[in-house]
Image (cartoon, helix red, strand yellow):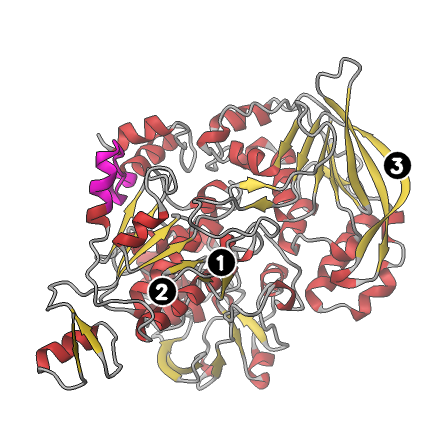
Amino acid sequence: MSACALRVFLQRAAVTRKAAQQTFSQTRAFPQCVTGSYTHSKGINTLTNSLRAEEKVTVHFLNRDGKRISVKALTGESLLDIVVNNDLDIDGFGACEGTLACSTCHLIFEEAVYKKLGPISDEEMDMLDLAYGLTDTSRLGCQVCLRKDLDGMILRVPDVISDARVDSEKESSTAPPKV
Amino acid sequence: WKEEDGVGVLGRELYLKSLGIHNGKRRVRGLSSSSSPRVCIVGGGPAGFYTAQQLLKARQNAAVDIYERLPVPFGLVRFGVAPDHPEVKNVINTFTQTAQHERCSFHGNVNVGKDVTIDELRQAYHAVVLSYGAEGNRSMGIPGEDLPGVFSAKDFVGWYNGLPSNKELHPDLSFETAVILGQGNVALDVARILLAPVEMLKETDITQNALEALAGSKVRRVLIVGRRGPLQIACTIKELREMVNLPNTRADMLPADFEGIAEALKDLPRPRKRLTELMMKAVKEGGDDKAEKCCGFRFFRSPVEVLAGADGKRATGIRLALNKLEGSGESARAEVTGQLEDVDCGLIISSIGYKSIPIDPAVPFDPRRAIVPNEMGRVQDTAGLYCSGWVKRGPTGVIATTMNDSFDTAHVLIQDMEAGKLDLSVNKPGAQAITALLQTRGVRTVLFSQWEKINAEEEKRGKSQGKAREKLLDVDEMLKIAWS
């Protein structure tokens, strides 16, 4: 098990909203990069001391308004964690709080970067299938953890069905109407 | 009224600018102390909260009040999302943050249209947003639909999710076969709740009476019927996968329904392709023969009559008409063939869509589409009135769809404020006036902090049962705890 797995867990524990009673989502979906299981939560305190030093990496988000947001983040953090921890202004990002129950953390990767990412699970693909503007280099941000070799990557925040003139027939041609 | 040109005292300039009025001519009714835009939202579900969220963010001086008929907030997130999908309910955290925002207030136990009219709200606020969703359901329109044993999915879901108006549903679960009409995610939720092992449900927030009824249920076979084919099925893959993986349940499909499907696979977009492949896998593999329960889809079938037993007292079966498909893809249509098929069953659940209803005679309503007619969220011919969510678009889409739609309406409203289409120079009293008016009518509201007492009580009761919460089913009991 890697210190990264622990890091991700600690990061998740540290995700707090500003002025809210935070109740933890019941089943946190750990991304593929986390090789450990939930049992790694035990003995955290003793292991914290032996964590490798986290590495800082730069990530660029290309927002829907065309603006680029650059942040420094720690390896091991998921891309959803980065958005939340840095309070980035991306409307509606991460509605289900990283539990693979929505597709609002949908991000589009550069092709070369996409190929370097870990494998995608059926569960992630199931939710990704519902994302508007799905591309061949799309992933859910809550399932991708930052690594050193992803330093400098540019992530595009896809448009959502935000034009109310688009009626349901024109909604994503890849997704069936659903409730 | 005084009209001034663009040059004025600096202080007044700033005041007017803060109202978003930038044109040369201004109407001034003296300097009022409060110039913040006040917006009223009707409906405390996802649409209401997401609209509020965006308004609060986009205008730093906007005050938003959310009115909700029930004492409890969150709408379908609380009463629609299946108990075994708790992660989907995480959005409640962000809604809670919004409700606790200093410029937002929640008012439960207010029946808009009855306790207070839309016109009264429009007088008290600069803008009113209708986000009251779809509380009705589409009926099948067939004989026997009102027989005991036939339920709308809306009511069945409301029953296991603790909607107060469905607490006396008492569905009879002593029959072996249940037939669900409709193949969307709601239909799959109902099937899954009917067939899931009780162990899977007993720690969720499903109501205790539903849990006990399901524990004693004799339902072993559920058929989910759709009028078109496998390529038109409306559910999504996550829900289908959950059905396929359901313990002690095997698939009961008709290979004949899947003729020609394999050939069509290669041309399908990825999401539809994966969904279809998963269904075909279920057809091929069938599942564990030792499984005690089974679940299957039946395609190309439309309900034409609910059959009653010899005494005519309750449903004992359903008559289905067999269809053929004209056209292909999402726009394929079902055409009758004249052939009929009868299925014995004791529980029939119609899951063919929710439906909005009119709230107030002052609000235009389109009865054919069952929505409030609007252009991008602006209610037709009615300045200052907007809509978001299902009442605006129709009852389809997941929470994220409603989220984006609500953001759209908020943007349009803000645009109108900034373009001077809403007269923000007039001071509006907001909740103060409405609460006072309600008081004269004997209506007392439930504040968000009072909902939190209900919330704490539900969690407390749940804890003693090993459940996430035990929902209160009775509105009077909710009010008693809220106002204690």
Using the numbered discs, state the Cα–Cα distance from disc 2 to disc 3 in whole angstroms: 51 Å
Let me know if residue B382 is in the magenta part. Answer: no
- Residue A156 % position (x, y): 49, 80
Question: What is the magenta range?
Answer: B434-452
Q: Is residue B428 left or right of residue B468?
A: left
- Residue B33 % position (x, y): 11, 64
Tell me, yes or no, whether dots 1 and 3 are on the same chain. Answer: yes
Determine the image quadrant of residue B34. bottom left
Q: Which residue is mark 1?
A: B402
The quadrant of the rendering that contains the N terminus of chain B is bottom left
Residue B99 or residue B40, whichever sits in front: B40
Instruction: Identify the residue at image location x=58%, y=54%.
Output: B396
- Mark with earlier residue (1, 2): 2
Q: Which residue is mark 3?
A: B340
Residue B259 or residue B468, whichever sits in front: B259
Q: Which residue is mark 2?
A: B54
